[in-house]
Amino acid sequence: LTETAPVTNWTLPECERRGTVGQPLPGVEQIIVGEDGQRHGPGVDGEIRIRGGNVMAGYFKQPEATAAVFDEMGYFRTGDMGRMDDEGFLSITGRIKEMLIISGENVFPREMEEVLNRHPSISDAAVIGQQDPSRGEVPVAFIELIDGAEIDPSEVRKFCREVLPPFKVPREIRVLDALPRNPTGKIQRRALIPMLEQSGREDV
């Protein structure tokens, strides 16, 4: 994060935990906070909040924006979701703004994307939500294939079902020549939203 100057965590060679971004840097405090504002213990998802000398003092000449991103204890609200283990190793699980609500469950695209990206024919994937009258939202996956690869959408959904619970399996799999990205290479999920109304639906 630019607001945190920008490094917050590290992994030392002699102290590594696969699947995490490591422990906080010296002088950096991290907590996980739930939707109710209560601090969570190890292994529970919530918003990652950070406090320390690396955190900005505020946005230049924007007092209201500054107030909105700091809580009453002075922790910066990152907008990222994550969990910590009992030794302080942090796992990032998604972005609050990207969260889907499927049949009353909070679901983050990152979990589904990581499964899709393990498929041998898929180069990269992005998942967004589509409004659904019975489930609130359903996940739709847009994928970019490895050069020369071909896939059957039903086979990809079967691949997902081996790992994910049914409500997290993408209802649709759509193949794109290239996923939309910004100049730094980050996938732009907002650019995928207009494509939801296009044809090519593959229902489960």
Image (cartoon, rainbow, N blue to C red):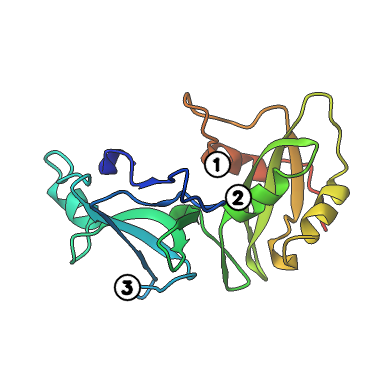
Observer-nearest of 43 and 177: 43
Left or right of 62? Residue 182 is: right
**Mark 3 or mark 2, which has the lower sequence index?**
3
- When the figure is inspected, residue 21 is found, relative to residue 165, above or below; the finding is above
**Mark 3 or mark 1, which has the lower sequence index?**
3
Left or right of 175? Residue 56 is: left
Amino acid, disc 3: Gly
Q: CA distance from mark 3 to mark 1?
A: 28 Å
Q: CA distance from mark 1 to mark 2?
A: 7 Å
Quadrant, the C terminus: bottom right
Snapshot quadrant of residue 165: bottom right
The numbered dot on residue 189 is 1
Badge 2 crowding class, 10 Å Cα cut-off, few under 14, some 14 to 19, many 20 or more, is many
Q: CA distance from mark 3 to mark 2?
A: 26 Å
Q: Position of residue 174 (x, y in %)?
A: 75, 41
Question: What residue is shown with label 3?
Answer: 37
Snapshot quadrant of residue 118: top right
**Mark 1 or mark 2, which has the lower sequence index?**
2
Residue that appears at 53% across and 36% down: 188
Observer-nearest of 122 and 59: 122
Amino acid, disc 1: Arg
Residue that appears at 47% across and 43% down: 13
Residue that appears at 52% across and 41% down: 190
The numbered dot on residue 128 is 2
Q: State yes or no: discs 3 and 1 in contact (Cβ < 8 Å).
A: no
- Comparing labels 3 and 2, the label whose residue is closer to the camera: 3
Q: State yes or no: discs 1 and 2 in contact (Cβ < 8 Å).
A: yes
Amino acid, disc 2: Ile
Q: Position of residue 5 (x, y in %)?
A: 26, 38
Q: Position of residue 30 (x, y in %)?
A: 32, 59
- Comparing labels 3 and 1, the label whose residue is closer to the camera: 3
Assign a secondary structure to mark 1: helix
